Image (cartoon, helix red, strand yellow):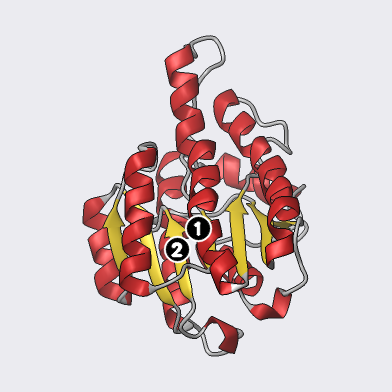
Amino acid sequence: MADNFARYPSLQDRVVLITGGASGIGASLVEHFAAQGSRTAFLDFDEQNGARVAERTGALFLRCDLRDIAALRAAIGQVRERLGLVTVLVNNAARDDRHGWETVEPDYWDERMQTNLRHQFFCAQAVAPMMKEAGHGSIISMGSVSWMKAQGGMPAYTAAKAAVRGLARGLARDLGPFGIRSNEVVPGWIFTERQEQLWASPEAVAANMERQCLKEKLYPPDIARMVLWLAADDSRLVTAQTFIVDGGAV
């Protein structure tokens, strides 16, 4: 982590759980929390990349298919046993696979909800008792600008990501009496390796840059630094809010 960015003393030794930490934004989140001295754990089904991130950062990696709620609950139980009470949850895992509205079947729709929305609730449900016991907590859930831009070509994804806002705000109300905060971070087009390989044609990049107020590409650390602030005590009275990090595109 660069020396000219903030360090948060309140994150030292704080137990942090990140979903989807094996690559992209998630891997950057793991790196940034580990650099803050947090006791960091992450869940992902990508065993190969997960092991690499764990080796690089010293974070605890547990292989888990987040669509399997029983496995998810068991993994979170292991995090508690090995690191202590989780007081920061970053609901990061998602996949923005493209799909045409004409071809979507009920099974595919349900799987997209499992991949992009359902686990966010069940992770929060599993860690909230630990946060209540600790007397504080911060849940940060990842949304998407895609639905805000009326982006087509992936209706199940945009529907799931639009629902994240309602989930985050509802949890803020339910959990606030216990000192637990819940916020949403909405990334713009973040140039991860996956995005660069699949969709970052020169034409698409130019069109996106035209929309942005700030004419720079965004990268995973730009999201990680916002998440650090929301996890730290510096934002202790911030809840039920949405923070868009997209260079001013929407």
Q: Secondary structure at mark 2?
A: strand
* Other-residue count near label 1 (Cα within 10 Å), few / some / many at <14 / 14–19 / ≥20: many
Residue 127, numbered label? 1
Whichever of callouts 2 and 1 sits on the residue coming sooner in the sequence is 2
What is the number of the mark on residue 17? 2
Residue 14 location (% of width, % of height): 49, 78
Percent across and percent down for residue 22 are 35, 57
Q: Is residue 157 left or right of residue 145?
A: left
Q: In the figure, residue 167 lies in which quadrant?
A: top right
Left or right: residue 159 versus residue 107 is: right
CA distance separating discs 2 and 1: 9 Å
Mark 1, secondary structure of its residue: helix
Task: Please state which amino acid type lies under the numbered disc 2.
Answer: Leu
Name which residue lies at 45% across and 60% down. Answer: 18
Would you say the residues marked 2 and 1 are in contact, meaning their CB atoms lie under 8 Å apart? yes
Which-is-in-front pick, marks 2 and 1? Answer: 1
The residue drawn where x is 73% and y is 38% is: 148
